[in-house]
Amino acid sequence: MQLSGVNLNTQDWMGKGDHYFKFKRKRRDGHLDDVFVTKGGPPLQTDVIKGTANPTFKPITMPLAHLNLGDPNCELVVESWDWNSVSDHDYLGSATFTVAQVMTAGGGRYTVPFKKDKGGKQ
C-alpha cells in the first residue's frame, strides 16, 4: 500500500510541517494496539516527509494478516503526526478505515478524512 496526505494540518509556526503516520488496530473492546510488520520489530510508521502539507510516503509491503489479523473488517487507525526536532511531536488527528473498504474502492484508491480527536498520546 502507499499512503499520501493532502492539505495536512501542522503545528509549526513556520513551514508546512514534517509529517508521518503511525498505524494502530482497533480491538473489539475499543482499545488500540500498535501494528507491527514483524514480530518483535518496531511499531509500523512511515518515514518523516519534511516541509510539505502534501506528503507521499514510500510504499509499505507487509503480510495483510499482520495489518488486520486476517479480518478484512478490522478497523485500522492511521494517526497523523507532525515531527519536531526540539520538542515533543505533535498529534494532528486520525483516520479510521477497514481493508474491506479499501478493496471495494474504485481504482484501488481510497480517501479517508483525518479527524482531530483526543488520542495520540506519545
Image (spheres, helix red, strand yellow):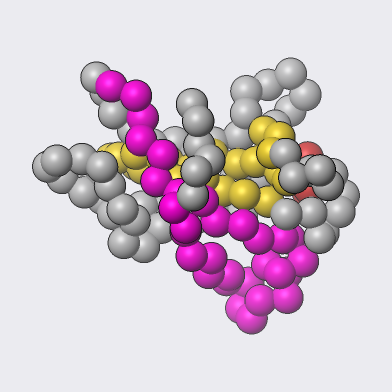
**For the point 50% across and 43% down, which residue is it?**
118
Q: Is residue 48 left or right of residue 33?
A: left
The answer to whether 34 is drawn above or below residue 74 in the figure is above
Task: Count all numbered tags in the image, as a single digit.
Answer: 0
Q: Is residue 109 left or right of residue 75?
A: left
Magenta stretch containing residue 4, yes or no?
A: no
The answer to whether 94 is drawn above or below residue 87 in the figure is below
Q: Which residues are magenta?
A: 87-116
Instruction: Please name whichever residue, 46 or 87, is drawn nearer the observer in this view of the structure.
Output: 87
Magenta stretch containing residue 114, yes or no?
A: yes
Q: Position of residue 96 (x, y in %)?
A: 61, 57
Q: Position of residue 83 (x, y in %)?
A: 33, 33
The N terminus lies in which quarter of the figure?
A: bottom right
Instruction: Please name whichever residue, 117 or 2, is drawn nearer the observer in this view of the structure.
Output: 117
**For the point 66% across and 76% down, which residue is it?**
105
Which residue in the rendered view is the most extreme toward the right?
70
**For the point 24% across and 19% down, which residue is it?**
86
Q: Is residue 102 left or right of residue 49?
A: right
The answer to whether 69 is drawn above or below residue 111 in the figure is above
The quarter of the picture where residue 108 lies is: bottom right
Which residue in the rendered view is the most extreme toward the left?
14
Q: Position of residue 119 (x, y in %)?
A: 53, 40
* Residue 93 shows in this picture: yes
Instruction: Please name whichever residue, 111 or 95, is drawn nearer the observer in this view of the structure.
Output: 95
**For the point 77% across and 66% down, which residue is it?**
100
